Amino acid sequence: MASHVTYKYIKENADIMEYIRRADETLEAMGYTEHSFAHVEKVAHTAAMILTELGYDERTVELARIAGIMHDIGNVVNRVDHAQSGAVMAFRLLDNMNMPASEISSIISAIGHHDEGTAMPLNPISAALIIADKTDVRRSRVRNHDPMTFDIHDRVNYAVEHAGLSFNEDKSSLILELTIDPEISSVLEYFEIFLQRMLLCQKSAKFLGLKFEMLVNGAKVL
């Protein structure tokens, strides 16, 4: 059964956009880094890039985009278990759009398994979503404008001057390249909060038949 639900269709849905907006407001009130449209659109784009480069069909790539833009809506309920509540919300929204159960299943499985506490790459969409989400580290996600009051998450994200995810020449590896200002945060401090996420990226890349490599300031660290 063909579906009319596309990434563009989702972006034009006022209700879903409101859930994304309000979910980010919740996290802002809790002191978290930015999880609004800049984040979810980047995740959607990166997940789609990964599957496109690996030769997946157009519809699978489109489902990855949809999962990417909707993956954090559960934060409107609570940060705790937001992946699971987001999956339930996505089910209701997409079911009401008459999306086929086969497509909904792929999307909600990916959303429900993207948080590092319970994450697991179950299918290509979920693997791509995990990698796209966990590699979105950048200075512009920091909301706090006072460096004197930065917590470790603010400091590490603010220290990242450049982050790029790309394939190597033969597409056997995904490489995350970071440029970190050591005057703001050390590489050790980065791994203090991101080690579990990077290992999850490694596991997700393996699911896709890839290696996951990481370069920090030109040095290979993973």
Image: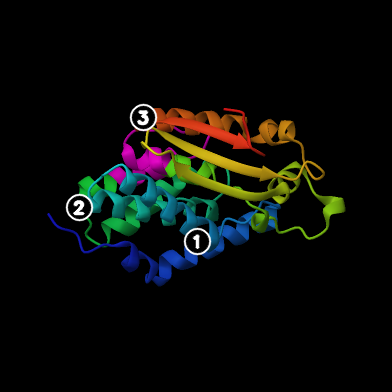
* Residue type highlighted by circle 3: Phe
Q: Is residue 125 magenta?
A: yes
Residue 117 in view, yes or no: no
Residue 146, placed above or below residue 206:
below
Marks 3, 1: nearer the viewer: 3
Which callout, 1 or 2, points at the residue further toward the start of the chain?
1
The kind of secondary structure element at disc 3 is helix
Where residue 122 appears, x then y in whole percent?
34, 33
Q: What range is drawn magenta here?
A: 106-128
- Disc 1 versus disc 2: distance between alpha carbons? 23 Å
Per the image, the residue denoted by label 2 is 100
Residue 148, placed above or below residue 188:
below
Per the image, the residue denoted by label 3 is 207
CB atoms at circles 1 and 2 under 8 Å apart? Answer: no
**Classed neighbour count for the residue bearing mark 3: other residues with Cα under 10 Å, few (<14), some (14–19), many (≥20):** some
Residue 214, placed above or below residue 153:
above
Where residue 159 appears, x then y in whole percent?
73, 47
Q: Which mark is residue 125?
A: none
What's the residue at 34%, 50% (across, down)?
A: 64
Q: Quadrant of residue 5?
A: bottom left
Frontmost residue, 216 versus 108: 216
Q: Which mark is residue 20?
A: 1
Where residue 203 appears, x then y in whole percent?
44, 28
What's the residue at 49%, 56% (across, down)?
A: 42
* Residue type highlighted by circle 1: Ile
Locate the C terminus by quadrant: top right
* Residue type highlighted by circle 2: Pro
Q: Is residue 192 magenta?
A: no
